[in-house]
Image (spheres, helix red, strand yellow):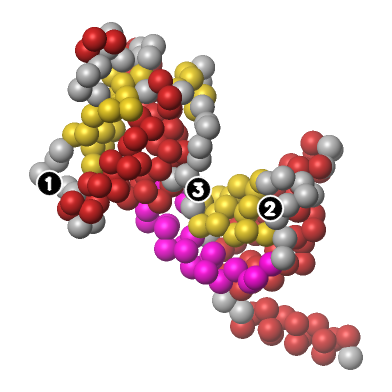
Amino acid sequence: MKIISLVLSFTMHANMSKEQQFWDWFIKNEGKYFFLGQVNDVNEKERLLDDFLEHLHSYCDKLFFEIGGHPDEKQDLIITAEGDVAFFDKVEALVNEAPQMEHWNVIAFKPVMTGFVTEYNGIKLNPEEMYFIPLSNKASTQLGVRIYAEGYDPNLKKDFLTAAYLALDCLLGEHSCALDIGYVEVESLPSIPERDELIAFTKLRRYVEWHKNKYGT
């Protein structure tokens, strides 16, 4: 009977879609991840994260995840393609197949964040202290932006650009950042009298929506 049971179990698993196989594994292990933030053993936490990533990569090795939330509330499980548009369909397919779970919010793509400060390689970008101007491109409906940041160092151009993209990811969310922003450059914030033509960085999300409505994207 045991052999027959194992064969039936293997057959059922083989007939599942790859999305269903992932969620089947997750449902059996969700308790370990719900209390992940309370795991004090660093090695055990790393083992759990590695195990999760291994199963996620069995579905698609271009996807990643984030887990978080308050201990006494539903936890957020974010599935992300790290801005790689080529794998957005994989994110959506996996999240669409997620079962209803009492203790989890399954979210496609990194969501919009508020009250954040981006830090990268010693660079600190506070959205409340940043500005932008839109850059038009007749060859694309995507929006280009020039971001003005305090303390910009042209010798660290690549790092500042990476930090700027991370800030955009938080401000707009992964989906909008990847699909709506086509070009980014960073410059030093001018003196106060010269800022009249600049727009507060925190208003960029509203500007993106206006731009999309105007051009029907």
Find out whether residue 125 is within the magenta segment. no
Relative height, residue 171 to residue 214 (above, below):
above
Q: Residue at x 46, y 38 (%)?
A: 170
Residue holding disc 1: 139
Compute the Cα span from label 1 to label 3: 28 Å
Is label 1 or label 2 in front? 2
- Residue at 80% x, 39% y: name it: 43
Q: Are marks 1 and 3 in contact (CB under 8 Å)?
A: no
Residue at x-position 55% and y-position 57%: 107
Residue farthest to the right, as pictured: 1
Q: Is residue 117 visible?
A: yes
Q: Nearer the viewer, residue 203 or 121?
A: 203
Please give the range of residues in magenta: 81-101
Q: Position of residue 89 (x, y in %)?
A: 42, 63
Mark 2: which amino acid?
Gln
Q: Look at label 3 and name its amino acid.
A: Lys
Label 1–label 2 contact, CB within 8 A: no
Nearer the viewer's eye, disc 1 or disc 3? 3
As drawn, the label of residue 38 is none
| Dot 2 crowding, Cα within 10 Å, few <14, some 14–19, many 20+ | some
- Kindly give the residue lying farthest to the left in the view shown: 138
Look at the image and say whether residue 89 sits in the magenta stretch: yes
Residue at x 25%, y 24% (from the top left corner): 198
Residue named by callout 3: 110
| Residue underneath mark 2 | 75
Q: State the SS at label 2.
A: strand
Quarter of the picture containing the C terminus is: bottom left
| 180 w.r.t. 186: above or below | below
| Up/down of 154 relative to 2, above or below | above
